Image: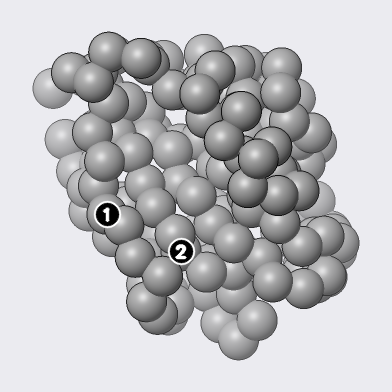
């Protein structure tokens, strides 16, 4: 099975400063955050890990999804036909990215993007997600903890 890209949607209620590994202490403004990652055969396991609030910090994104004051998990999509960096590139055309976030293994400026509100998020998702529904799979929809 080839790697599958995925997209996570997180919601940040208030301005928060978080230590993000070597990137240092970063300030995250309120809004929606879209994170692009990829996983192999265990991509669903990876997404479930992102949803867990307790885990050791291994990737940049773990610093935003774990512990008190974490961002809330909203949704996730699997994008099996789309290269991870291609998805990041599409989002970068619409949204501002957190420089260096999630890009330890590639040359993209960022793999984490912020939408200030629902209409900005909607426009970005419409342009970045594949329009063919057989090329995208919704993983989960919930505002629950
Ligand atoms: Zn990339």
**Residue assigned mark 1:** 140
State which quadrant residue 16 falls in. Answer: bottom right
**Residue assigned mark 2:** 73
State which quadrant residue 113 falls in. Answer: top right
Disc number placed over residue 18 in the picture, else none: none
Crowding around mark 2 (Cα neighbors within 10 Å: few <14, some 14 to 19, many 20+) is many
Q: Is residue 139 visible?
A: yes
Crowding around mark 1 (Cα neighbors within 10 Å: few <14, some 14 to 19, many 20+) is some
Query: Is residue 27 positioned above or below 38 on the image?
Result: below
Q: Quadrant of the C terminus?
A: bottom left
Q: Is residue 4 visible?
A: no
Residue at (13% x, 22% y) in the render: 1
Q: Could you tell me residue 69's position as x and y percent?
A: 65, 81
SS class of the residue under badge 2? strand
Q: Residue furthest bottom?
A: 68
Which of the pair 55/6 is nearer the observer? 6
Residue at (54% x, 57% y) in the render: 10
Asked if marks 2 and 1 touch (Cβ < 8 Å), the reply is yes
From the viewer's perspective, tell me whether residue 94 is left or right of residue 77. Answer: right
Q: Could you tell me residue 139's position as x and y percent?
A: 25, 47
Cα–Cα gap, marks 2 and 1: 10 Å
Q: Could you tell me residue 5's position as x and y percent?
A: 36, 28
From the viewer's perspective, tell me whether residue 23 is left or right of residue 84. Answer: right
Residue at (76% x, 35% y) in the render: 97
């Amino acid at each position: 099975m080839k790697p599958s890209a995925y997209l996570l949607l997180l919601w940040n209620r208030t301005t928060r400063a978080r230590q993000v590994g070597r990137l240092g202490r970063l300030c995250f403004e309120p809004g929606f955050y879209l994170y692009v990652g990829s996983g192999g055969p265990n991509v669903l396991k990876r997404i479930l890990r992102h949803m867990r609030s307790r885990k050791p910090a291994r990737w940049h994104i773990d610093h935003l999804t774990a512990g008190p004051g974490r961002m809330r998990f909203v949704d996730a999509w699997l994008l099996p036909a789309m290269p991870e960096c291609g998805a990041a590139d599409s989002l970068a055309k619409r949204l501002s990215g957190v420089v260096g976030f999630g890009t330890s293994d590639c040359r993209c400026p960022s793999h984490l993007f912020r939408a200030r509100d629902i209409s900005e998020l909607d426009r970005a998702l419409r342009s970045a997600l594949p329009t063919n529904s057989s090329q995208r799979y919704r993983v989960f929809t919930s505002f629950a903890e």
